[in-house]
Amino acid sequence: MELGNLPEGCKFNPRCPYKQEGCTGTEPDFSEVTEDHYARCYETEQVLSQEYDRESASSEDFYEKDEEAERKTILQAENVKKYFGESGGGLFDLGEEDERVRAVDGVDLKLNEGNTLGVVGESGCGKSTLARTIIGLEDITDGQIKLEDKDISVPIEGRDRETLQQIRIVFQDPRATLNPKRTIKQTIMRPIRLAGATHEEARDKTRELLEAVDLGSGYMDRHPDQLSGGQKQRVAIARAFASQPELILSDEPTSSLDVSIQSSIINLLLDLQDDLDTSFLYISHNLAVVSYISDYMAVMYLGRLAEVGPTEDILKPPYHPYTEALLSSVSVPDPDVDQKRIRLSGSVPSARNVPSGCRFHTRCPRKVGEICENEKPPRRVDEEEEHVIHCHIPLEELREVEPVLQK
Amino acid sequence: MSDIRSVPNSILELKDLVVKYSTRSGDLTAVRGVNLSVAKGETQGIVGESGCGKSTLAFAIMGYLDRNGRIDSGQILLDGEDISDKPESWMRNIWGNELNIVYQDPSAALNPSIKIGKQIGEVLETHEGLSEKQARENTIDMLRELQISDPEIVVDSYPHELSGGMRQRVCLAMALVSHPKLLIMDEPTTNLDVTVEAKILDIIKDLKEEFDTTIIYITHDLGVVYEVSDRSGVMYAGKFVEEGPTDESTSPFTPIPVGCCGRYRRCPRRPGRVSSDR
């Protein structure tokens, strides 16, 4: 939409899925659709006849459970820790007075081929640090990260070229990740050329990729400053897919974009994933986005996992009390949905000085007592080994909890 | 054309408002004839993508348009009085007093070198002639109203000592302390964590009951609009394309807000997908 160059007729017609011939004539006036509710649209009947099917999306369409068993594991993280800063004393003095920032403190994750694992949490919970350790931008303090069967617990300098091609990342801010002096063609061709392709092959591949992200080859010779934010993010995505990676990490790739562009970027990622069977680790604080695109979800709090499991199970009881509070904080634009009201007090404690016992106990609305302050919560496994909750409250009790969202 | 409802004794009424920016390549019309009527105590939500003119509309109402922007035609009636052609010297009397705005980024809205209490108290000292001491007391009460713990300590803090959510609450306090007739909120929770956002939205809902403030709430998030507003309008390319009571508008009628549906949890990948940003 360019204000200087608006289309004839309804201004939305070039993007509208319901467009008819009449829409390009004169701009529609307001008409009353329902009582006291006005809209400028010619195709009122057509739009009204479109039933919103909000329910259907949550069901089996997205999940092909039978296939899960055969999918091989792409990424496996075991007890990954990343501490920042110097430890207090010598090499073996890692005792109580340790003042290091425990950004990630013992995280276990598993991601299968072609699946998406969403990681959610508030700012400062360590989710971005986790992504940076996986891609190798940070060395890890302890633990192991495996890509298929290969140990990749080393920083990026120590990884071979093949590993670099296998894992790519898309960052939050496309403005900061594209070299302003390189054309789009140069930017995308580079990883393809490094993989050993000839100049011609790389150029053809680049053209294909740009088309796949809905940009077209007309953008090949442009520079990043000639693109909008959404278009830059599309280029960043095209570049991430350029080396045909097995795993793409996305660190809040849509949070600086407009909502309508967010949804088109997310749909783009999903389409590309369908075609190429790439695995995603998707990091965001936006529960709505994550629950939409992920097969599995991990909820992080202060460097540890609170809950991990298939998305469907995360969104219904039993919940970890933290997940419950997060779900209750999401704004839902649907008057028919009843949302339970839970508000957390205070802000996330400092990762330099983490609370004892269960890290969430200082803000937990369901705190049971001293046990939460003193003991690390047990790992409770729900049903089929997949859904894990770290909490002192027994699963039976958590199962009794009312769902946060109800029709 | 002004077939949207018109309420009698509205606090704010916009009549065929047209706002233009002059650029090197000629005039750009950012707001192309907007009619709107907001009743006292009501919250009017305005949704739309970036560039649809929603912030320009807010700036036009405030009289904060850039030097190259101007109200080309139309009227802005604040409590019956047309403020669209008033000079800055006149507007100064109502800024912060009858008309106020809260921005997206609280750290840019607060002066980093002035203590919180002084910044909020200034409004009261200037417009209501309160003494410094009284202003301080009212400020502390207001901060408490916004559920800031230890307001006595916060008044003596500098903005950088507070978290993002706290800062936004301070901005809200500053906007509400003079009980404005109209409060414009331009994406006030967009930069915040979901948990903090939920809490701020609760506070906004409580306060509007308590102070009977009329609010224009601008956002690109349909979920947020549903939470806070009584009525909402959808803007596209400088015009309202849909307007109505919020429970109606959020089962959006025009295809346009459907494009903004990415935020909806479990939003189905429906066939009528809005195409990209080109």
Image (spheres, grey):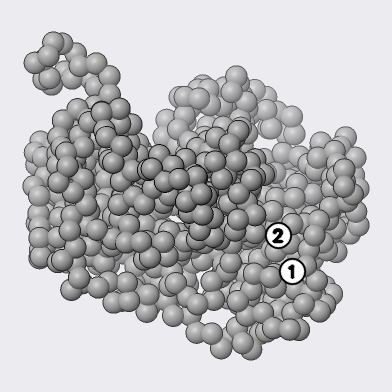
Secondary structure beneath label 1: loop
Disc 1 crowd rating (10 Å Cα; few below 14, some 14-19, many 20+) is many
Residue of label 2: A1
- Work out how far the residue at label 1 is from the one at label 2, CA to CA, in angstroms: 9 Å
Return the chain for callout 2. Answer: A
Query: Which residue is found at the position 70% from the left and 50% from the top?
Result: B55
Q: Which mark is residue B255?
A: none
Q: Position of residue A222 (x, y in %)?
A: 65, 45
**Above or below, A310 relative to B154:** below
Q: Is residue B117 left or right of residue A205?
A: right
Q: Which residue is mark 1?
A: A11
The chain containing the residue under callout 1 comes to A
> From what the image shows, is residue A137 above or below residue B179?
above
Is residue A401 in view? no
Q: Quadrant location of the C terminus of chain B?
A: bottom right
Which one is earlier in the sequence, the residue at label 1 or at label 2? 2
Q: Residue at x 9, y 54 (%)?
A: A380
- The amino acid type found where label 2 is placed reads Met
Residue A179 vs residue A257, the one in the foreground: A179
A109 on left or right of A404: left
Verify CB contact (< 8 Å) between mark 1 and mark 2.
yes
Q: Amino acid at mark 1?
A: Lys
Image position, residue A45 (x, y; %): 64, 89
